[in-house]
Image (tube, helix red, strand yellow):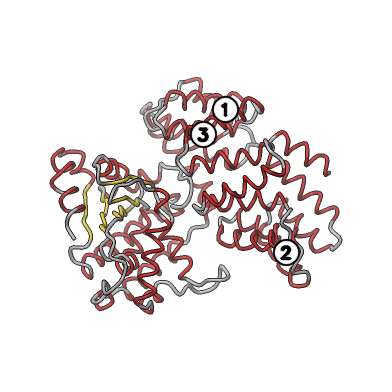
Amino acid sequence: METSLELQLTTGDQKASEHAYNNYLRFSAKHPELGEALQAFIEGKLPLSEKHCRHYLKNYPNDVSAIRLLAEIAIKLGIFEDAERLLTQCLTLAPDYHLARLNYAYVLNKREKSLQALAEIEKLEKHQPNVPPQQIIKAAILVRLGQFDKAIALYDDLITRLPEQASLYTSRGHALKTIGDQQTAIASYRQAIACKPSFGEAYWSLANLKTFCFEQEEIKQMQEQLLNSELPSLDKINICFALGKALEDNSEFEQSFKYYQQGNELKNKIEHYNANETTELIERTMSVCQSPVFKYADATVCKQGDPIFIVGLPRSGSTLLEQILASHSMVDGTKELPDIIAMVRKLNCRKKRNDVSKYPEIITELTTEQRKSLGEEYINSTRIHRGDAPFFIDKMPNNFAHIGLIKLILPNAKIIDARRQPMSACFSGFKQLFATGQAFSYNLENIGHYYLDYLSLMNHWHKVLPGQVLTVNYEEVVGNFEYKNILTVYTMVMYQN
């Protein structure tokens, strides 16, 4: 089994190598409960695996294999903060545990700690250079750092050595798309499909270019792939959304909607979104964030007015607004930054998924010093994404729920609510397969509830923070060049305190 692992690491098949390694651990595990935890993990039974693993670690708290397994469970669940903590513990106990360090680099990059992640890859390269799984993660780190030319060159080298790895072509395509080389990106996505005709991500990547139109033969190929009963769920989801876009472009609206609906139903089963939880959070936020909370909010806290937050529903014109603002020499465009969401997770003080969150109530208990510290933490953590301009944009749409926190820690921050006609915004979200987050968007009823919650909270912010949030309507922006370029966005947002 160790030989199999080494071979797969050399050939770059990271998923297969980790699967082989977990199998190796399962068969070599001296304690049956650890073996059961690993078996449950391999079968995708994550709650059962976590249960066995935590129980085993109570008796054997320094077993690094079990700690890494628990971290892998957290990674699968998208709980990267827990994964980072566990892998830090793991590497403290076993600094030469190279697979754990590889996991660690991956998690750090996911948590926007990309420079630290790159340092971990460099440690692995000193031990053994040119190992494909390390280089694959390194390329993803370089993309996150905005070093696209280096990342593309690394993907090119990996493809030369591993020409049958479809995911390398899509990753290279994403980087090429980001630098504006759309035609080469299209060719790269199509190479991925040539390698693996069932590779759903490549089809959706083409569809997600928005201006791309599938050829009839490609539509037929996607439909044939969906007939395969062995097609993995994620590939099926990607292909359904791609077919929805392809047939919509062909004005075959009834069939298009059926594919969108099928893809959303499959995705919704994975997400397990609970609309009532969102409504409860919004109601608690409105109850907590009343006018008196903000009366003395700006006293001696972080006064920097660098950030321009663009919030709202996804697919409501935030990218257009960012492009308009970032065309000005005084504004840097960035992306959807996760820093406020990460701060909220830290403030909620939940150690287990079923614990009651202390957020938003906890924000009323923050001292002036704590608010100042949080504001400075945000400014410092986002600096890596900025250039030299005095202003920068954070277009994470979900930050609309945290405007109260933002105004308490960054009272001079500018906030734009990107607003779009309700049906257009909601249905556009339904047609979009998001890379991460936006779990509400995969069910029409959930979308409706979410929109009403969003509208209710934005009305509340206008009431308790009068003049602090600028609403910009998408339809007015695209229909009025002067409104779009100067009168509202530049004057009201950049220069009005």
Front tag of 1 and 2: 1
Q: CA distance from mark 1 to mark 2?
A: 39 Å
> SS class of the residue under badge 3?
helix
* Left or right of 495 on screen, residue 239: right
CA separation, marks 2 and 3?
39 Å
308 relative position to 237: left or right: left
> Which residue is label 2 attached to?
53
Q: Foreground: 307 or 168?
A: 307
State the mark number for residue 36. Answer: none
Label of residue 156 in the image: 1
Q: Position of residue 364 (x, y in %)?
A: 35, 77
Above or below, 125 against 354 in this view is: above
Question: Which residue type does callout 2 highlight?
Answer: Cys
In percent of the image, x 40 and y 54: which residue is there? Answer: 382
In the rendered image, the vertical position of residue 49 relative to residue 203, given as above or below = below
Q: Which residue is mark 3?
A: 150
Pick the quarter of the image with the C terminus. Answer: bottom left
The residue that appears at 51% across and 40% down in the rendered structure is 142
Q: Earlier in the sequence, mark 2 or mark 3?
A: 2
252 or 128: nearer the eye? 128
Residue type at tag 3: Lys
